[in-house]
Image (spheres, helix red, strand yellow):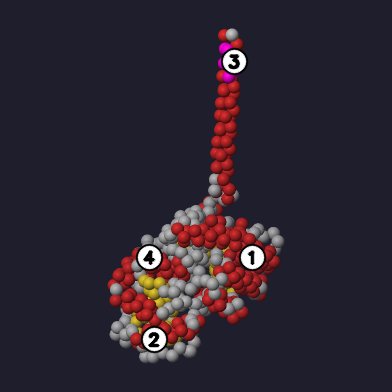
């Protein structure tokens, strides 16, 4: 994988003229492989173009030959993520008690961020008066690390491995409409009926209140403790982002208006080259005479956490069908047969490229969905939490699969869904059509991201790209509407007074005429 990324980096080095080298601090605090893998090729490409990169990451890049590339290893955060806070439990209960799970997630990430900031090498960098950086690049989903831009008095760029909440979109100046743009925390696609629009409006208002009065105050406390009392509030600092890169793509996501400093750069920045499959997997798939099914629930959702009835249902259905099955299963508790190969970790991108793969059963994580589309593989989506519901619903709307309730997988519906997709060419054709669109983007997301980062470096933050910040009452035209209402009331009152005076004058004239006639 790393070899392919380096080759891609060298290619891009020749395609894009180098700019003045800069010192870049990249901060990726979330201990989730899917969050890290999206941007690893970017750090390698920037480094290959002469930039000095310091990377804080939970998944260090294993390459001893890199120069001008410093890494701070935060991999200890996985122990907090999985063992202390048990992210699997948070995921399992996400749909039964959203507010409680959001609070648990925030508490977990705040604990992780505190431990990461207390890392000796991080403290050394913070306290080194001679240290400097020209640009900070920070994961925007967990934005506390934005404070590093204040510490080093330099511009910053936000990056997100998925879409952002509508509250953050609004803070960046992007137009918001609960009728058109569902929050990625909600379960809705862009095409909502009346009831869904009502609920999405509640999501929008509720998330706005939650972030403003709970999320940001807690992070502000952490920032002030580690960066000083004079650091501005996080909500204010976020608005000063020079640019924000979203790992979204119009082929996969809904179209929405974005400010000039917010770019969609998704659609395969993490794709690898043609790395050979392990010998046992290659042999297993080559021998799949009727084709093969790949089943994985990603890195955070785990097959071993499915209830026993669901696991039994899958095993029974897989055993009755004539297809071979590759199943990412995290322990050895599942009993298999010659048609089912189970492993705790599988090279997903290489597997999906194999011509015998006919179907991908997935939780609907964004990277998994991108990889399925790229290889033209139809899906059965079993979303579990956060953006997976909207991801799968968009894929279904585009005709490339079927959605199943992960909490209620019946044997008949599972078997029927698999047979429907594998026996009906419309799903495969839809997936292949989307694959063509994804592969033929005019500019790759990686190429675009590198160019804009170097543009921001060159123009010291490119402040002219940022939209004007105005108060909410001005954005909603409340002052203008107040003026028109006041003007209307004043005009009506003035007209009423004038009319009253006119009537009074006419009455007086009549009285005068009457007196004269007498």
Magenta residues, as a range?
507-514
- Residue 469, can we see it? yes
Q: CA distance from mark 1 to mark 4?
A: 38 Å
Question: Relative to 373, does residue 310 appear above or below in the rendering?
Answer: below
| Dot placed on the residue nearer the N-terminal end, 1 or 4 | 1
Check disc 3 and report its element: helix, strand or loop: helix
Look at the image and tell me whether residue 181 can be seen: no
Q: Are marks 2 and 4 in contact (CB under 8 Å)?
A: no
Q: CA distance from mark 1 to mark 3?
A: 78 Å
Residue annotated with mark 3: 511
State the CA–CA distance, disc 2 to disc 4: 29 Å
Foreground tag (2 vs 4):
2
Select label 4 or label 3 by which is in front.
3
Q: Are marks 4 and 3 in contact (CB under 8 Å)?
A: no
**Residue nearer the viewer, 63 or 142:** 142
- Which of the marked residues, 4 or 3, is nearer the chain's N terminus? 4
Residue under circle 4?
397
Pick the quarter of the image with the N terminus: bottom left
Nearest to N terminus: mark 1 or mark 3? 1
């Amino acid at each position: 994988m790393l070899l392919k990324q380096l080759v891609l980096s060298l290619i891009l080095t020749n395609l894009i003229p180098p700019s003045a080298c800069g010192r870049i601090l990249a901060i990726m605090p979330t201990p989730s492989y899917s969050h890290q893998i999206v941007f690893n090729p970017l750090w390698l490409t920037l480094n290959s173009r002469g930039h000095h990169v310091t990377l804080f990451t939970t998944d260090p890049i294993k390459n001893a030959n890199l120069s001008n590339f410093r890494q701070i290893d935060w991999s200890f955060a996985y122990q907090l993520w999985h063992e202390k806070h048990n992210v699997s439990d948070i995921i399992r209960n996400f749909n039964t008690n959203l507010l409680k799970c959001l609070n648990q997630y925030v508490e977990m990430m705040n604990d992780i961020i505190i431990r990461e900031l207390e890392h000796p090498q991080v403290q050394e960098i913070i306290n080194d008066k001679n240290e400097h950086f020209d640009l900070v690049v920070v994961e925007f989903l967990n934005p506390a690390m934005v404070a590093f831009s204040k510490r080093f008095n330099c511009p910053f760029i936000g990056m997100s491995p998925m879409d952002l909440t509508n509250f953050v979109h609004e803070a960046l100046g992007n137009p918001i409409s609960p009728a058109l743009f569902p929050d990625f925390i909600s379960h809705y696609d862009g095409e909502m009926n009346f009831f869904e629009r009502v609920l999405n409006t509640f999501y929008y208002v509720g998330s706005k209140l939650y972030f403003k009065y709970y999320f940001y105050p807690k992070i502000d406390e952490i920032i002030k403790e580690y960066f000083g009392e004079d650091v501005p509030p996080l909500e204010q600092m976020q608005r000063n982002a020079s640019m924000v890169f979203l790992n979204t793509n119009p082929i996969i996501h809904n179209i929405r208006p974005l400010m000039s400093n917010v770019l969609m750069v998704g659609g395969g920045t993490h794709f690898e080259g043609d790395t050979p499959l392990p010998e046992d997997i290659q042999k297993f798939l080559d021998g799949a005479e009727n084709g093969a099914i790949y089943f994985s629930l990603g890195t955070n959702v785990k097959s071993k956490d499915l209830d026993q009835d669901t696991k039994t249902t899958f095993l029974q259905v897989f055993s009755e069908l004539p297809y071979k099955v590759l199943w990412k299963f995290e322990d050895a508790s599942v009993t298999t047969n010659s048609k089912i190969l189970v492993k705790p970790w599988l090279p997903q991108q290489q597997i999906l490229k194999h011509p015998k793969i006919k179907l991908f059963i997935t939780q609907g994580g964004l990277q998994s969905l991108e990889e399925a589309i790229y290889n033209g593989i139809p899906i059965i989506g079993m979303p579990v939490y956060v953006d997976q519901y909207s991801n799968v619903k968009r894929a279904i709307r585009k005709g490339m699969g079927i959605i199943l309730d992960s909490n209620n997988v019946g044997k008949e519906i599972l078997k029927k869904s698999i047979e429907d997709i594998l026996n009906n060419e419309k799903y495969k054709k839809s997936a292949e059509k989307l694959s063509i669109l994804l592969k033929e983007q005019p500019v790759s997301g990686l190429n675009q991201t590198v160019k804009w980062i170097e543009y921001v470096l060159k123009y010291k933050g490119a402040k002219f790209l940022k939209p004007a910040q105005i108060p909410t009452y001005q954005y909603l035209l409340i002052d203008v509407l107040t003026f028109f209402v006041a003007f209307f009331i004043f005009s009506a009152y003035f007209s009423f007074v004038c009319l009253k005076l006119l009537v009074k004058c006419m009455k007086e004239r009549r009285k005068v005429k009457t007196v004269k006639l007498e």
